[in-house]
Image (cartoon, rainbow, N blue to C red):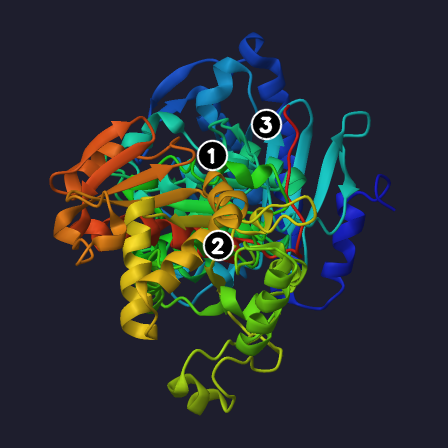
Amino acid sequence: MVGQVTLQEHLKRYSAMGSDTLSAAVKATLAIAGAAIEIADLVNAGAVGSAGGTSDRNSDGDLQHELDVKADDILRRCLLAVPVAAMASEEANEIEIAEGKICVAFDPLDGSSNIHTNLTIGTIFSILPATEDLNQAFFQRGSAQIAAGFVTYGPQTSLVLTLGDGVDVFTLDRVTDQFRMVRSNVRIPERGSEFSINMSNRRHWEPPVRLYIDECLAGIDGAANRDFNMRWVGSLVAEAFRILTRGGVFLYPSDTRPTYGEGRLRLVYEAHPIALIIEQAGGAATTGHERILDLSARNLHQRVPLIMGSRHEVDRLDELHRDPKLMASVSAPLFSRRGFFRQWKEAPMSRRHPIISITGSSGAGTSSVKKTFEQIFFREGVRAVYIEGDAFHRYDRAEMREQMAREAQLGNRHFSHFSPDTNLFDELEQAFRDYAESGSAMTRHYIHNDAEAALHGCPPGTFTPWAPLPENSDILFYEGLHGAVVTDKVNVARHADLKIGVVPVINLEWIQKLHRDRSDRGYSTEAVTDTILRRMPDYVNYICPQFAETDINFQRVPTVDTSNPFIARWIPTPDESMVVIRFRNPRGIDFSYLLSMLPQSFMSRANSIVCPGNKLDLAMQLILTPLIMQLIERKRSLKWGPGMRGGTSNE
C-alpha cells in the first residue's frame, strides 16, 4: 500500500522476474538509495558540515563544490558492492570499468550551485545494459536504459524511479532510514499551465522558443488561450519533480551564446534518465527537433538542449521548431504582441471552428475582398467553407417582387433586402452557432444567373435546397450584408472570430451600384435611384451599425469629385482613391511595420492608417494573412471539446 511499501519491498517483484540484468539494476538502485541517504545527511548539515566549500572545476569545466566531490565518492563506494560493469560520473573524465551486467551513469549532485541558497538539489542516475565494448556502453540510445531515477534533497528527500513500466515516488522515512512509496504510477497532465525557463537569456533564444514563451506570456489573450505561471529554480531535479506533480513545461534550449549552441545539460547522465522518467509518466522530452531517447552520445559529457513536460506543450514547441512556414505566419511583426483578439475572452467564440465574416452593403466590393481571402486560403493551405449572405434571404426573386408589391399597397415604401423582414437572421445565427460548436452547418445557394443555374440545376432567381457544409474544414467564411448584424432578437456578430467591414464612402457606394445595376442588370438610373432611396431607412438601421461591430474596416475614399453620384460617368479607379483602414482594437498592431510596407501610407488617427487605393490588396495580404494563421493555430492548439477553456491559479 502507498505509504507503507518500502523501496526494498517494491523492488522484490523485479528481482523475481529471473533476469540477471534486471536483478543487477535492482541492486544498483538499492545501492544508490543507500548513497542518497548519506548524501542527504551531508546536505542537511549545511555549513555546519562540509557542504559549503568550493574546491575546483570538474572534468567539463564547471565549478565544483566540495559536496560534489563527496557525493561522487559516496556513490562510487556504494556501487562497488554491486556487479557494475562500468561507471560514468559528471565529476570524472574517464569511465571506470569493472565486471557485471549493467552500466551506471550519474550526476552526483545536480543543481549544486543552489547549495548556498538552500534550494533543492539532487542526484540523477541512468542504468544501461553492459555492451561488449564497455568503452561504448554509455553511447547507446536513451531508449536502451533499463532504469532511471533521481533523488531530491529539499524539504524532504524523495526518490523518483522507473524500471520501464511507470514511475513511482518514494520519500525517505527519517525514523527508519527507509524510502517509502508515496505515489504510484505517476501521470503528467496532458496540458500544463506553468513554464520554466531562464528569462534573462531571451535575447539569445531561437525564434521558436521565443515565440512559444510569448504565447505563454500573452495567456488568454494569445494563441495559448489560457494563462500561465512562470517558475525557474535552476535545478533539473526540482524542475522535473514539479512537472511530475503539476505538469507544465521546462526549457533549457540551445541559444546563440558561445558554448550554448548544443545546449548545456549532459545527455548521458542528465537528459537521458530524466527523459525516460518523463515519458514513462506520459509526458514528452525533446530537443525541439528530436526525441531525447532517440539520441546517442558522441562523447561522455556531450551537451544537449532539453524541452520536457506535458505532452501538449512539448508538441507545440516541436511544431514551431519543425515548420518555418508556421513560424513566419504566427510571428509576423504586425501582430507580435497578439493583442488583436482580446475580445475572445468576452464571449464564447468559435475557437475550435473559427469563423470570418465579411460585411458590406450592395456594391461595396465584398466580392473583391473574398477573392483576396481565397488567395490567402489557397497559398496557406487553409480548407475554407463558404456561406453567401443572399442564401439567407427570406424570399426568392419572384417572391420578393410579390412581397414588395404587397408592402407598397400597404404604404410601406421602404421594404428592402436589408431588413429583418426579408432575411432569415435566426437561421443565419444558428448556422454560425452550429459551425462554431461542430464544424458543420446548413446553407444553400441563391442562383443569380444562367451560368449558376447550369451549375446547380435550379432556375435563376431561386434557391438550391438546404444542405450541410462540406466536412473537415479549417474555417468558415461568410460574405454578405449581415455578417455582424445585431438586433433585439439576434446577435450574429458574437459568433464571428474575425469581422471585416468593406465600406466605401456613401457617394462612392452609390456610384458603384448605379454603374453595376445599369450595366449588368439593365436598370435605368431612375430605378436604381428609387432602390437606393427605398433602402435608406434599413441601411441606416441594419447596415451601418454593423461597422461598429467589425474588427477591421476597409473604406475606399475617392480623390476625385463624386459630389453628385447620380451623374458620375465613371467609377473612380484605385489610383483615384485612398483606403482608410480602421482597427477596432489597435492594441498590439505594429503600425510602423505597416507604414514601412505600404508606400505613401500615413496614420490619420491612433487606430487608423491610410494607404493608396492601388495598395488595397497588398494591405489586406499583410494584415489578414497573420490573422488567419493565428485563427488556424488556435484551432490546432485546442484538443478539448467546444467551449472548454484552460485555466490556472494566480499563485
Image x and y of residue 534, in percent:
48, 54
Image x and y of residue 151, in percent:
61, 36
| Side of 243 where 214 appears, left or right | left
The kind of residue tagged 3 is: Ile
Q: CA distance from mark 3 to mark 2?
A: 89 Å
Q: Report which residue position mark 2 lands on.
A: 534
The kind of residue tagged 1 is: Ala
Q: Nearer the viewer, residue 184 or 454?
A: 454
Mark 2 and mark 1 residues within 8 Å of each other at the beta carbon? no
Q: Residue at x 47, y 56 (%)?
A: 356
Q: Residue at x 18, y 53 (%)?
A: 572
As drawn, the label of residue 218 is 1
Q: Residues within 10 Å of mark 2 (few under 14, many from 20)?
A: some
Q: Nearer the viewer, residue 408 or 29?
A: 408
As drawn, the label of residue 39 is 3
The kind of residue tagged 2 is: Arg
| Side of 249 where 346 appears, left or right | right
Whichever of callouts 1 and 3 sits on the residue coming sooner in the sequence is: 3
Image x and y of residue 433, in percent:
64, 58
Q: How many marks?
A: 3
